[in-house]
Amino acid sequence: MNNSINELNQLKANAVKNLEATEGRRIVVGMATCGISAGAKLVLDTLKKQVAAAGLDNVQVMPTGCIGMCIYEPIVEVFEHDEEKVTYIHMDPDRVSRVVSEHLVKGKPVVEYTIGEDENGKLKSLNDLQFYKKQKRIVLQNCGLINPEDINDYIAVNGYQALAKSVTTMTPQDVINLMKASGLRGRGGAGFPTGLKWSFAAANEADQKYFICNADEGDPGAFMDRSVLEGDPHSVLEAMAIGGYAIGASKGFIYVRAEYPVAVERLKIAIKQAKDMGFIGKNIFGSGFDFDIEIRLGAGAFVCGEETALIASIEGKRGMSRNKPPFPANKGLWGKPTIINNVETLANIPKIILNGPEWFKSMGTEKSPGTKVFALGGKINNTGLVEVPMGITLREVIYDIGQDCLNGKQFKAVQTGGPSGGCLPQKYLDAPIDFDNLVAIGFMMGSGGMIVMDEDNCMVDIARFFLDFTVDESCGKCTPCREGTKRMLEILDKITQGNGTIEDLTILEDLAENIKNTSLCALGQTAPNPVLSTMKHFRDEYVAHVVDKRCPTGKCKALLSYFITDACTGCTACARKCPAKAITGTVKEQHHIDQDKCIKCGVCMDTCRFNAIIKK
């Protein structure tokens, strides 16, 4: 089937009528991975059964993507024509029963299952929460609104209009010029101008070109790309087709890790639907432009986020980086010109085509226009997916959106960019978040993971954790990364075990700088960043480990000892709970811990009701 623009507009008109549910109610259940893991599938199934049993023929029940506020999952939202939506949180089958019988049948919302009421007695929605006040949803605009498994929902929100506009009213060069004018920079971490990258591939003559979506999101704590694929897969397909048209490619690949089964399944559904409707395939919109898309599953190797390793993997080879130049835009997949953009970058493109470059540049900063999606996690009250304008400060994200650290603890640092990034301390809380500002203070944005740490985190242990990850994920091709990171990890293990010396700190820094300067690809070049940033901004913690043989936060067990004070009443509870039988003493007398037997598990401190056990 080849759609004309008139046919697309008719499809849109029909889809809008359905999406607005003008004659009934529409209920969405957050069915991204976060919701499913919290029990949303059972909630969705129960809703469908009970709505059918109640004879509510005018009620649609459907899955949607990540609504954003993961701490409230499973989330159910009820949309009614000309009414404010009602948001239900922490849903389960029992709560579903009440919502169906009281809200859907009798028309009275179940207030205690919602976020609550404001001072005027009006039910609050998610948009009323501080979490959303400073967000600007462009990439995530459709996530939580549309059914990602129904192409008609995407068409209802202007889906495939940008592709139609591109291939019927613009030349490939027009598209590239528009992308250049927008200032869109790659959201995968490096921030390279998207239009400029496309122009390199477009300028190369070849019998075949390729367009690849990099969905190999591997940073610990990052789930931005996964959420877009789960909640709005057609936006990525549409953008790939636009990019293919711009550079002259007829074939696209989505490289996605196999650990994302929900995203993979929804991509398969979306690709089939788009092909059936003629938005992918031959002679798209009668323009003579052909473009097909296939999925390639990755095995979860972090190094395959690097473009040349990703290309090798698609070719059926071991995922290992190669020297550049030549760059993929000149010689990429199977030696042909290839463009690689990540999911978030692509999700911006249809909206830029439809709204224009000036619209896009009205958000963000002069050199980093638009928004950025972050996976906000760690020691923070409001975890979830956030999309904010470029240039917002870390303070606004952590305190206004994230609502401060858990349990009243003091903020200590935030890790940006995953294993490739660094740990930003308190003094940078007012630094604007964009590509150039973060680089200027010695950090990088990365793909969008943002892990908050509080006063209880040991920064030496944090550096060790990320380096341990990098050692496992190194492809092993180049010596600095393969061997150097192992030596760094050995030193960090030595320090956290209480065997480090001042000389080790000097060796660690020298190794880090050499690995950074001599590794083949970005994995090795950025692997030392967590170590270098923590050594620069939290050096006192390293010194405490190697000189005082003490971990200031008490996280490094080898440097930790438990003691029973004279506040002990001799109740024997700690001795009875101790798994190592390291505590001795008689009833009603102060007990003692044998330090040679103590395994430093902390059970004794958790058990004591008299605060008589301390750790040093």
Image (cartoon, rainbow, N blue to C red):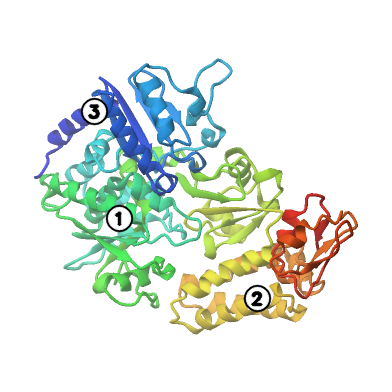
- State which quadrant residue 406 falls in: top right
Q: Which label was assigned to residue 264?
A: 1
Residue 216 locus on image (x, y percent): 38, 61
How far is disc 2 from disc 3 in space, using C-alphas?
59 Å
Please identify the quadrant where the C terminus is shown: bottom right
Q: Nearer the viewer, residue 442 or 607?
A: 607
Q: Amino acid at mark 2?
A: Asp
- State which quadrant residue 295 falls in: bottom left
> Outermost residue toward the front?
587
Residue 586 locus on image (x, y percent): 86, 62
| Residue occupied by mark 2 | 493
User: Dot 3, how many residues are within 10 Å of its Cα: few (below 14), some (14-19), or many (20+)?
Assistant: some
Left/right placement of residue 163 relative to residue 572 reads left
How far is disc 1 from disc 3 in space, using C-alphas?
26 Å
Left/right placement of residue 459 relative to residue 239 reads right
Q: Nearer the viewer, residue 468 or 3?
A: 468
Earlier in the chain: of badge 2 and badge 3, it is 3
| Residue occupied by mark 3 | 18
Please identify the quadrant where the N terminus is shown: top left
Task: Assign a secondary structure to mark 3.
Answer: helix
Left/right placement of residue 136 relative to residue 567 reads left
Q: Amino acid at mark 1?
A: Val
Earlier in the chain: of badge 1 and badge 3, it is 3
User: Dot 1, how many residues are within 10 Å of its Cα: few (below 14), some (14-19), or many (20+)?
Assistant: many
Residue lying at 74% horizontally and 79% vertically, measured from the top left: 499
Residue 453 locus on image (x, y percent): 64, 54
Residue 116 locus on image (x, y percent): 53, 25
How far is disc 2 from disc 1 in space, using C-alphas?
38 Å
